[in-house]
Image: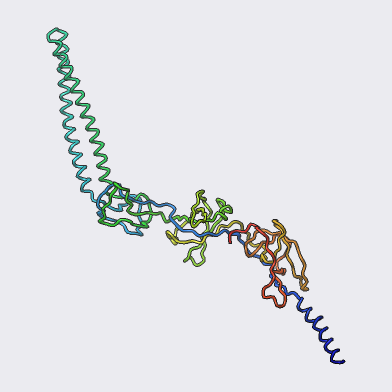
Amino acid sequence: MSVFIFLGIAVLTWLFVFREDDDRVTYTTETVTRGDIENLVTAMGTLQPQDYVDVGAQVSGQLKKLHVDVGSEVKAGDLLAEIDATVYAARVDATRASLRTQQAQLLDREAQLTLANIQYEREKNLFKEEATTRESLQTAEASLKSAQAQLKALQAQIEQTESTLRVESANLNYAKIYAPIDGTVVSITSRQGQTLNTNQMAPTIMRIADLSTMTVQTQVSEADIGKLRTGMDVYFTTLGSQGRRWYSKLNRIQPTPEILNNVVLYNALFDVPNENRLLMTQMSTQVFFIESQAKDVLLVPMSALTFAARTRSAVVKVMNGDGDIEERKVLIGVTNRVQAQIVEGLTEGEKVVSGSSRPGQQKPVAGMGGPGMGMGRR
């Protein structure tokens, strides 16, 4: 009988002690802290110069001399390259010789016109005195008109030759290629000795870029493009920047998208000063558009919040000094995937419940974050 009594006591002890421990909940708490929070839209981008010019050849010929290398700093008007100008110089000389010949002919035509005019006036006076025939007067008049016409024709030829000379002189000048802007030679696509043919297309010799201001071009998905607005704050990092941030403001969003692998992407661009030349062409960037932010505010983890509908309020469980749990309604400000700003309802240093677990559970049961809440792309 005593054995049965002992077993009964053991069973009752297990039921009332160990089962009670099994039902005990362990809470994970976080302290309400003060700090900064950002709600971000992230994207990848590349760097390119804000201003650049592709310098090409306007005349055909052999690239005789390159006066710069990649990386050379140039000023507007500096000589960059020379094309063999032998043919163009010969054309200028030939056109000038033709012009001189025509100018000499012009003097002869002017003299002939003067003579024809004198003869016409004489025949006209003689005809008045009936000292010559009408036929002679008509012949003198025709000779005058012919001399006038020949003079005008020669003057037109001279104008045409002068125009041709201007073209040939311009082509001769185009054989020397000058820098159109101040900047840096970032690429050279033609080599010394190469023959350039402008009849097919304008060949590019080099690119000159102003590296003092760079443009960041980012591609933002159609899901996030609606969160961007012109003038919003943005910063980016580069692979070799060791965490350094460059700050700017969004300048423009191009309305026409690019479709890559069935993904619709929009170009968002902004400029950044580059006085120290640390930013270089085609560098990859990680871009962060600041949709909203708050500084020196109360913060709690998102896992501690339970949202009701699509509002800026939530419920949080607070643990007091005695270890008791109470629910409290709070007002939410800026949120991201990790944290939320508390506008009202909590004070710094309080403990909030971010999760709970029971014996045997491997993972704590976290609070439920609300839908939307103005989060950026994570």
Q: Please tell me which residue is depicted at 32% across the width and 48% down the height of the picture.
A: 202
Q: Please tell me which residue is depicted at 69% across the width and 61% down the height of the picture.
A: 342
Q: Please tell me which residue is depicted at 40% across the width and 52% down the height of the picture.
A: 52
Give the image location of residue 362, x and y in percent.
67, 75
List the single residue furthest toward the bottom. Answer: 2
Q: Which of the two residues, 218 or 49, is positioned nearer the viewer here?
A: 218
Q: Quadrant of the N terminus?
A: bottom right
Q: Is residue 350 above or below residue 157?
A: below
Give the image location of residue 276, x and y in percent.
44, 60
**Residue 272 visible from this viewpoint:** no
Q: Quadrant of the C terminus?
A: bottom right
**Residue 368 quadrant:** bottom right
Q: Please tell me which residue is depicted at 31% across the width and 53% down the height of the picture.
A: 80
Q: Which of the two residues, 325 or 223, is positioned nearer the viewer here?
A: 223
**Residue 244 visible from this viewpoint:** yes
Q: Is residue 90 above or below residue 214?
A: above
List the single residue furthest toward the right. Answer: 1
Give the image location of residue 132, x and y in percent.
12, 10
Colour convention of the picture: rainbow
**Residue 314 quadrant:** bottom right
List the single residue furthest toward the left. Answer: 131
